[in-house]
Amino acid sequence: MILTTITIITRNRPKVLKDCLDSLTKQVPNQGFKVVVVDNSLGDEETKQLVLSYRDSLSVSYFVESKVGIPFARNKAIKESKTPIIAFLDDDCIVQKNWLYSVELYFKFSKNASILVGRTFPKEKTISSLVEYWYYCRFFESNVIRNRDLVKLKSGLIIDFKNAAFRREIFSEHLFSSDTPFGDVGDEDIEIGMRLFKESKLRNKSIFFNRHMVVYHKYSESLYRLFYRNFWNGYSNFIIEREKGFHLKNAIHIFSNSFRSNIETYFVSRLQKVLVYFFIVVYPFFSRIGRLYSLFTLYFSRDILIPQRK
């Protein structure tokens, strides 16, 4: 019996998608799962041919979602997944070979688990990717309850769809919303994550962090991209808080020892260390500017959406 469908959404990025699919062919065991790829372009022929070329090594299906936007593509992937477990990856992720095994094993032995979220490390050691990774660790540390090897999440803020797995039934009433800010740098995963967390509590289920679910992800490739993303994250955070009633802020010191230990092994020089710490301090200001911009647009326009990836 096939337990898991691994879903990937993509848009005009066949080169990074190839690396992701290559890593899935190396899963141990390497059979017994399905892969659903949803192309969110208007049908990029290069992407289509790439996906179809993996049919000999993966049980892979290719679909097109013509409505541009992550929520539409994710919902299409959920609709096309028929297995008891639905797992999500981004197209720029590379998974460790025991990633799927750790997902299915934990769901098998814990009937109380409704969602698993894994560990996501940076692919590269650039300044921008390390700053973004630092704040990923910050959100993680402030939103988990540590009690044993696998720890519980205490909010939906870090239900991270680039490395997560779900029991299918949780999507029976909850899909991605298309009426909140979304796009290339939106927070549609935070919005649905908060709803899924609430649903899990109502069902007396728990959401766990599984340290054995390891992927390597391409964080922001430049400082421009880093601050651009954070500006629009601040914008969409504010709207989600205002319209959905969720509280998305975290009060935690950005230079705690746990954060340092997560990142300092990546430094390649003293200069890089200084620059990373400098931009860690600067980074939150762009989010705050995005929040102010959202407040400004509240009085002048209700139609601004976050830009889509070209």
Image (tube, grey):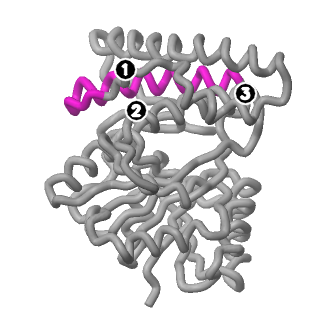
User: Which numbered tag is attached to residue 222?
Assistant: 3
- Indicate the position of residue 146 as horizontal and vertical percent values: 39, 45
Q: Is residue 170 magenta?
A: no
What kind of residue is marked 3? Ser
Image side of residue 134 versus residue 54, left or right: left
Whether residue 73 appears in this view of the structure is no
Image quarter hosting the C terminus: top right
Q: Which secondary structure, mark 1? A: loop
Label 1: which residue?
A: 251
What kind of residue is marked 2? Ser
The answer to whether mark 3 and mark 1 are in CB contact below 8 A is: no
Image side of residue 289 versus residue 176, left or right: right
Residue in view at x 73 percent, y 62 percent: 18
* First to last magenta residue range: 223-247
Quarter holding residue 59:
bottom right
Residue in view at x 60 percent, y 20 percent: 227
User: Which numbered tag is attached to residue 142?
Assistant: 2
